[in-house]
Image (spheres, grey):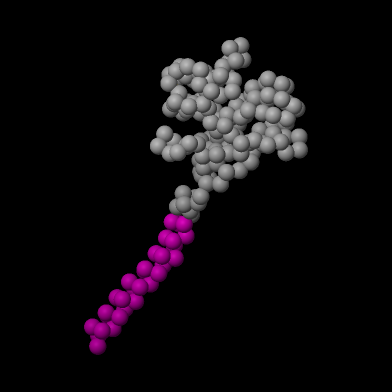
């Protein structure tokens, strides 16, 4: 009798410990892992006012990375080049070189995008001018919304994914 009461209390304490652990652990795991399992949503981001670009201007704009996590900090920031080619037309490029992803710079005098890492060069339309880049700069979808130009964030394909 004493033995079965002891056994019952042992199982009761094991069961309650398991319940309490699950009650505390599941929300913590959900909080930590939830953002990693959430699909990346591409969103429109304001790049600036259309009037801020004169014809031919190429400017660097900061945008937030679409895959950013709540704790990403400054790593959530990305950038894009926006070039005005007409009254209501723009060329928009990811800042990342298509070789190994270094940020490219715009040289206004040469009218070229240059990559500082391995000497890759791109023409003003984003096509490869020289060096190791295997393809043109990635374009970002854009739209004019009111007085602003907006860029749609995209997850850039990697070397092993279809482009
Ligand atoms: S990363 Fe740009 S040329 Fe290599």
Question: Height in image: 4 above or below 40?
Answer: below
User: In terms of secondary structure, what is the magenta stretch mainly?
Assistant: helix
Using the rendered view, name the quadrant where residue 77 is placed. Answer: top right
Report the front residue among 87 and 156. 87
Start and end of the magenta stretch? 1-30
x, y percent for residue 134: 44, 26
Q: Is residue 15 magenta?
A: yes
Q: Position of residue 70 (x, y in %)?
A: 53, 45
Residue name at image x 64 percent, y 35 percent: 142
Q: Count every numbered label the image shows and give the total.
A: 0
State whether residue 3 is above or below residue 130: below
Residue 94, given in percent of the width and then of the height, sits at 55, 30
Locate residue 100 relative to residue 106 in the image: left or right.
Answer: left
- Residue at point 69% right, 34% down? 149
Regarding residue 5, the answer to whether it shows in the image is yes
In the rendered structure, does residue 148 fall within the stretch colored magenta? no
Quadrant containing the N terminus is bottom left
Residue sitting at x 64%, y 22%: 58
14 left or right of 80 in image: left
Relative depth, front residue between 83 and 135:
135
Name of the residue lying farthest toward the top: 109
Residue 22, x across and y down, in percent = 41, 65
Determine if residue 73 is in view.
no
Identity of the residue drawn at 65% across and 25% down: 83
Left or right, 148 with reference to 2: right
């Amino acid at each position: 009798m004493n033995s079965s009461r002891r056994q019952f209390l042992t199982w009761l304490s094991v069961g309650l410990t398991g319940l309490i652990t699950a009650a505390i652990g599941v929300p913590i795991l959900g909080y930590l892992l939830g953002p990693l399992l959430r699909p990346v949503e591409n969103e429109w981001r304001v790049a600036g006012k259309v009037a801020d670009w004169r014809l031919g201007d190429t400017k660097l704009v900061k945008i937030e990375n679409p895959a950013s996590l709540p704790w990403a900090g400054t790593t959530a920031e990305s950038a894009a080049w926006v070039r005005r080619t007409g009254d209501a037309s723009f060329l928009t490029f990811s800042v990342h070189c298509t070789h190994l992803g270094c940020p490219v710079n715009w040289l206004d005098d040469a009218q070229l995008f240059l990559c500082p890492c391995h000497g890759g060069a791109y023409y003003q339309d984003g096509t490869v001018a020289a060096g190791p880049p295997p393809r043109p700069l990635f374009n970002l979808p854009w739209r004019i919304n009111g007085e602003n130009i907006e860029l749609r964030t995209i997850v850039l394909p990697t070397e092993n994914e279809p482009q």
